[in-house]
Amino acid sequence: MDRDFIERRDAGFYLIGSRVPIDRVVWEYRNGEDPETIQSHYPTLSLEQVNGAITFYLNHKDEVEQVMEERRRQEDAYVAAHPAPPHLKEKLDRARQQMLARRG
Protein backbone atom coordinates (compact mmCIF):
# COMPACT_ATOMS: atom_id res chain seq x y z
CA MET A 1 0.00 0.00 0.00
CA ASP A 2 2.70 2.52 0.96
CA ARG A 3 4.55 1.85 -2.31
CA ASP A 4 1.61 3.52 -4.07
CA PHE A 5 3.08 6.85 -2.94
CA ILE A 6 6.82 6.30 -3.33
CA GLU A 7 9.01 5.34 -6.26
CA ARG A 8 12.73 4.83 -6.58
CA ARG A 9 14.42 7.23 -8.98
CA ASP A 10 18.14 7.53 -9.56
CA ALA A 11 19.61 6.85 -6.12
CA GLY A 12 16.67 8.05 -4.05
CA PHE A 13 13.01 7.74 -3.18
CA TYR A 14 10.51 10.29 -4.47
CA LEU A 15 6.82 10.88 -4.02
CA ILE A 16 5.11 9.59 -7.16
CA GLY A 17 4.02 12.36 -9.51
CA SER A 18 6.29 14.94 -7.91
CA ARG A 19 9.89 16.09 -7.70
CA VAL A 20 9.85 15.94 -3.90
CA PRO A 21 12.33 13.45 -2.44
CA ILE A 22 11.15 11.49 0.59
CA ASP A 23 14.14 12.97 2.44
CA ARG A 24 12.38 16.32 2.79
CA VAL A 25 9.22 14.83 4.27
CA VAL A 26 11.18 12.54 6.60
CA TRP A 27 13.42 15.37 7.79
CA GLU A 28 10.41 17.46 8.78
CA TYR A 29 8.64 14.45 10.31
CA ARG A 30 11.69 13.58 12.43
CA ASN A 31 11.83 17.21 13.58
CA GLY A 32 8.31 16.98 15.00
CA GLU A 33 6.22 18.45 12.19
CA ASP A 34 2.75 16.96 11.76
CA PRO A 35 1.57 15.77 8.32
CA GLU A 36 -0.67 18.82 7.82
CA THR A 37 2.22 21.21 8.40
CA ILE A 38 4.51 19.21 6.13
CA GLN A 39 1.86 19.27 3.41
CA SER A 40 1.56 23.05 3.75
CA HIS A 41 5.26 23.34 2.88
CA TYR A 42 4.75 21.32 -0.32
CA PRO A 43 1.52 22.56 -1.92
CA THR A 44 1.89 20.18 -4.87
CA LEU A 45 1.47 17.23 -2.47
CA SER A 46 -1.78 16.00 -1.00
CA LEU A 47 -2.10 15.11 2.67
CA GLU A 48 -2.58 11.51 1.54
CA GLN A 49 0.80 11.60 -0.24
CA VAL A 50 2.53 13.02 2.86
CA ASN A 51 0.96 10.34 5.06
CA GLY A 52 1.94 7.71 2.48
CA ALA A 53 5.54 8.93 2.53
CA ILE A 54 5.64 8.78 6.32
CA THR A 55 4.16 5.28 6.30
CA PHE A 56 6.71 4.18 3.70
CA TYR A 57 9.51 5.61 5.82
CA LEU A 58 8.29 3.86 8.97
CA ASN A 59 7.98 0.54 7.13
CA HIS A 60 11.36 0.84 5.34
CA LYS A 61 13.33 2.91 7.84
CA ASP A 62 16.75 1.28 7.34
CA GLU A 63 16.60 1.48 3.55
CA VAL A 64 15.35 5.08 3.50
CA GLU A 65 17.92 6.25 6.06
CA GLN A 66 20.70 4.55 4.09
CA VAL A 67 19.62 6.40 0.93
CA MET A 68 19.33 9.67 2.88
CA GLU A 69 22.83 9.23 4.33
CA GLU A 70 24.28 8.59 0.86
CA ARG A 71 22.58 11.73 -0.49
CA ARG A 72 23.97 13.74 2.44
CA ARG A 73 27.49 12.45 1.74
CA GLN A 74 27.15 13.40 -1.94
CA GLU A 75 25.86 16.87 -1.05
CA ASP A 76 28.66 17.38 1.48
CA ALA A 77 31.25 16.34 -1.12
CA TYR A 78 29.75 18.74 -3.66
CA VAL A 79 29.74 21.63 -1.19
CA ALA A 80 33.35 20.88 -0.22
CA ALA A 81 34.38 20.86 -3.90
CA HIS A 82 32.37 24.01 -4.74
CA PRO A 83 32.60 26.39 -1.77
CA ALA A 84 30.55 29.56 -1.79
CA PRO A 85 32.53 32.75 -2.42
CA PRO A 86 33.44 34.40 0.91
CA HIS A 87 31.38 37.55 0.22
CA LEU A 88 28.27 35.46 -0.48
CA LYS A 89 28.80 33.37 2.64
CA GLU A 90 29.13 36.54 4.75
CA LYS A 91 25.95 37.98 3.21
CA LEU A 92 24.01 34.77 3.93
CA ASP A 93 25.35 34.66 7.50
CA ARG A 94 24.21 38.26 8.10
CA ALA A 95 20.76 37.50 6.69
CA ARG A 96 20.49 34.41 8.88
CA GLN A 97 21.47 36.41 11.99
CA GLN A 98 18.92 39.12 11.16
CA MET A 99 16.20 36.50 10.73
CA LEU A 100 17.07 34.87 14.05
CA ALA A 101 17.12 38.27 15.79
CA ARG A 102 13.59 38.98 14.54
CA ARG A 103 12.35 35.64 15.93
CA GLY A 104 13.96 36.10 19.35
Image (cartoon, helix red, strand yellow):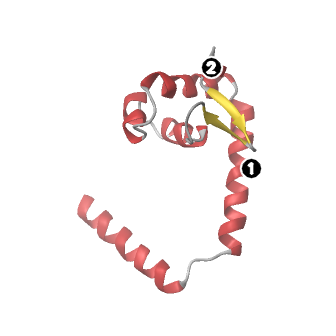
Residue 26 at least partly seen: yes
Sort mark 2 into few (<14), some (14-19) or many (20+) by Cα contacts within 10 Å: few
Rendered view: 98 above or below 63: below
Rendered view: 85 above or below 26: below
Between discs 1 and 2, the one toward the N terminus? 2
Q: Nearer the viewer, mark 1 or mark 2?
A: 2
Label 2, secondary structure: give it. Answer: helix
Name the mark on residue 70.
1
Kind of residue at disc 1: Glu
Q: Position of residue 4 (x, y in %)?
A: 62, 20
Q: Position of residue 37 (x, y in %)?
A: 37, 34
Kind of residue at disc 2: Asp
Residue identifier under label 2: 4
Q: Locate residue 91: give its quadrant.
A: bottom left
Q: Residue at x 65, y 69 (%)?
A: 79
Residue 104 at least partly seen: no
Q: Locate residue 76: give its quadrant.
A: bottom right
Label 1, secondary structure: give it. Answer: helix
Q: Residue at x 59, y 24 (%)?
A: 5
Query: Does residue 31 appear left or right of residue 83 in this picture?
Result: left
Instruction: Choose between 35 and 43: the one closer to the eye.
Output: 43
